[in-house]
Structures are given as C-alpha cells and as structure tokens.
Amino acid sequence: MTPADHVSPIGRGLLNRRNFLRNTGAALGGFGLAGLLAQDGLLASDDPTNFSGKSPIRPDIDPDNPYTPRSPHFPAPAKQVLVIYCPGAVSHVDTFDYKPDLTKFHGQKPPGIPAVTFEGPSGNIAKPFWDFKPRGASGKMTSELLPNLGALADDFCFLHGLHTQTSAHPQGENFFNTGFTMEGFPSFGAWVTYALGSENAELPAFVAINDPRGLARSGKNNFGNGFLPAAFQGTDFNAKNPPANLARPASYTPADDRSTVDLLKQLNDRHLKSYPGDANLAARIASYELAGRMQTSVPEVMDVSGEPESIQREYGTGDGSDLKREYAKNCILARRLIEKGVRVVQLFNGSDPAGGNGITNWDSHSNIHKTHAMQAEIMDQPTAALIHDLKRRGLLDNTLVVWCTEFGRMPFLQGNGTGRDHNPDAFTCFLAGAGVKKGFTHGESDRFGFKAVAGRTSIYDFNATILHLMGLDHERLTYYHNGLERRLTNVHGHVVPEVLA
C-alpha cells in the first residue's frame, strides 16, 4: 500500500498537477476580480447592514453603567415585560383552544392521525378532560382547568396559530426563549435589557423568578446572556431563595462595609482606566457594584410578608399545596419587581432539568387528568391574581404580559391511554396589557387542534411582535458575533399586526 492510498479521493485529486494548477488559477482569478470590483465601488458596502437591508441600531451603552435607561427604536406602549413561562408544554386543547369535534369523535381514530408520535404509538382521539364554558363579554370558551385565568379572558389576546420547530423540551425552551434550538444564544430578556437598560439602578434589569422546585429543563439558557455582554444575563432568585451572599456577616459593621466598598471603587476605577473599552471588565465591575446596592434593595422587595391580608388571600399564599403557596409568593414578588421598574421579569411555573412527566412541570405523558390538575392548582389562582393586581394598580398600561409554553399537546392519547404527547404544530399562548387587543383571538388550529391552519404564527413572529411592543425593530436589534449580525429572530420573523391595539 502506498502513502497515496491513505488519502481521500478529493485529496488525491488535489495531488494531481493539472487539478492543482486549474484550482489555483481559478482562485487567483477570483481574487483579481474582487479587487477590480472593489476599485469600481461595485462590492457590498463596508456598512454592517444585515440581510434585511436595514442597518443595525447599536445601543449607546456606557461601559461604566450598562443599565442606564436607553430610548427604544420608536415610541411604544410597553416599557416593561412580564413573561409567565410554563415549562413542559401545556395542553392547548384542555385549556384555551376549544374543539367540539374532540368530543364528537372521542374514542375514534380519524384518517390523517400519525401512527407514531414523539414518545411512541398514538391512541384514539380524546375529548377535553375538563369542560369548556364561555367567559366574559367576549364569550371566549375556556376550560374549567383554569377558571381564574378564564375569568380574565376579556383582558387577553389569544394566539391559537402558534407552531414551533422542535418537539423536544430542552430545544423547545431554548427556541422559545432564545430563538435557537442550540445553546449559547442570548435570551429574550437579555436582548431587551441590552437594548433598553433599566429604570431602576438598585435592582437587576432582568430578573428570572424560578419555580419553587428549581430550574426549568434548559436551566440558565432560558435567561442567559449568550454572547451579549455579561451585564445583561438574568439574575435568578425567588421569594424563598434570595440571591446568594448578600447578607453582611454579623461581625462586620456597616462602617467596615462602607470603607471596603469605597476602597474597591477606587481600585476598580484605577484598573478600568488601564483597560479602556474592556466591556467584560466594565460589566464585571458594574455587576459587583449592583450587588452592593442589592444588599439593601433586594431584602426590601422580597419581603412579601408585609403585603396586606387581602392581597395574601387573593394570591393564595395561605391555602392549597406548599408549592402553590410558594408560587403565589413568587407572583407577589413579580408584581413588586414590576412596580420597582425592573425592565424584564420572567416568572417560571414548572421546573426539573431531568424531566418529571407532569410531576414537576406540565409534561403529561400519562395520567394527564391528575398531573395537569396538579399543575393548574399551583398556577391558576396566583397567576390570575397577579395579572388582575397589575391591572388594578394601572401597571398594565405600561407592562406587557406574556403567558407561554414551548409547544402544545396532541388531540389524541398516547398508546398508554392516559396522556397526550408533544405537539409542535399547534399550541396557544396569550398576551395582555400594553399595546395588545383585549378579548381578542388570532389564529386557529384545525378542527382537532392538531395543526395550525389560520393565522399561523411562528416563534420568530411571536418574538418579533413582543419586541415591537417594546419599541424594538427585531431586524435592527442585532449584535455582531463571529462574523454575523445575530438577532433574536435569526433571519426570520414578522410582526403580527392583527394583535396590536
């Protein structure tokens, strides 16, 4: 065997003298043509215009104070956003997407139903596990699984034509919250705070309130900064677990603390002057300074025990399961953060990086009647109270509320006969508050809730619309990374004008 036998066919072709000269000549000719076109001004401009033809809008960020509030791209109704995220995939056909044909064809298997879905063989069509009834002046049909949220239907803008690219939970969470199924991309909250900063210098610009049971499946990817400056990652804590290391040791006096902070500021300022323009260094210093201010601001905002008894009853902090009571406190914390001017609050209802099959999140592959009911007992009353409280206090005038989940569930049962499998082709989310229509429904799934057929809305469209309501052009909110102008909506997405008030 000769050495050439170890070379691939393509490699052997390159060892051929004629092929080498031909390829080299073509390459040199290309370089020459590029040079001539550049002399005549016929190449693309040096202006970093993205694929849409629009030039990026770079936020004017002071490295020493990256959270300073910044103007949006255009005037917009929403100044803040509250994202209520339900990991595990809430069943749309058992909550907000009323499909009478599921009852009509209950127990049957109509043509067109796939034999196998994400987790195995499919069963028969199953009617909703909870009755639907009309709500409010709009008459919106919602199920008895979530009666408290259903009672607020006249304040909601439902999107029934949503669809996504994946039926796997980790990738689904990544895609919904970052615009990509892969890891390493900035979250929605990071993009917004990168663009707009915050109105409160004493609290983080972006807070992720994790479920009492822990992180969601994709963990900190859901609120990470990706390749954006580190200052814009979400700060995660909840009513039960404050940020770590904020409390001053008992042996350390306030005067000692103050003198240490002053000395650190002098040293940091001196160090930063030696490395001007170092965004990572500036972000780290800003984070430490914010942490110092949080020693007093966070304990105050987290003290939900001082809320009136009427508020405690409304949210349900004293009744139901332990998880419901803890989640209710998280909902009060979310309202307090919005009151304080925090730009983005992401509230999670569900957890478990290892799965859970309906026990720790909404992923109900078996016993959906039991597991969805358990999640609803935790989520329904506190979430409805939170939205109603925001409205009563006038905070919905400037706050956009987003209730969402990564995909839906199938209109038929799995082979086990007790659960619904993942459905990426149709699911429901809703918006409320600043800038969106009230008591309105956009989009439609088919007669069984199997696939979106009208007003089809991709995750790109959904995120583009939310950014638009915050005054941000999703095509111009970009960050140059690894040779590309990256953005939340990748190279896709259109604002959904039908839902705008």
Image (cartoon, grey):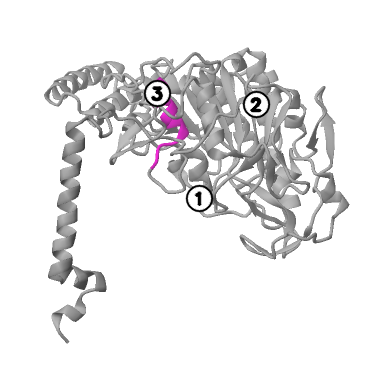
Horizontal and vertical percent for residue 483? 28, 40
Q: Residues within 10 Å of mark 3 (few under 14, many from 20)?
A: many
- Residue 191 image-quadrant placement: top left
Q: Residue tagged by mark 3?
A: 195
Q: Which residue is mark 1?
A: 170
Which tag, 3 or 1, sits closer to the chain's start?
1
Q: How many marks?
A: 3
Whether 151 is drawn above or below 170: the answer is above
Whether residues under marks 3 and 1 lie with C-beta atoms below 8 angstroms apart, the answer is no
Sequence-earlier tag: 3 or 2: 3
User: From the viewer's perspective, is the residue at label 3 or at label 2 nearer?
Assistant: 2
Q: Residue at x 31, y 34 (%)?
A: 480
Q: Is residue 376 above or below residue 411?
A: above
The numbered mark, 1 or 2, whose residue comes first in the sequence reads: 1
Find residue 301 and name its label. Answer: none
State the residue in front, 213 or 57: 57
The span shown in magenta is 185-197
Residue 498, numbered label: 2
How much space separates mark 1 and mark 2, taking CA atoms? Answer: 30 Å
Looking at the rendered structure, the kind of residue marked 1 is Pro
State which mark lies toward you, 3 or 1: 3
Q: Amino acid at mark 3?
A: Ala
Q: Is residue 478 visible?
A: yes
Say which quarter of the image contains residue 438.
Answer: top right
Is residue 372 shown left or right of residue 238?
A: right
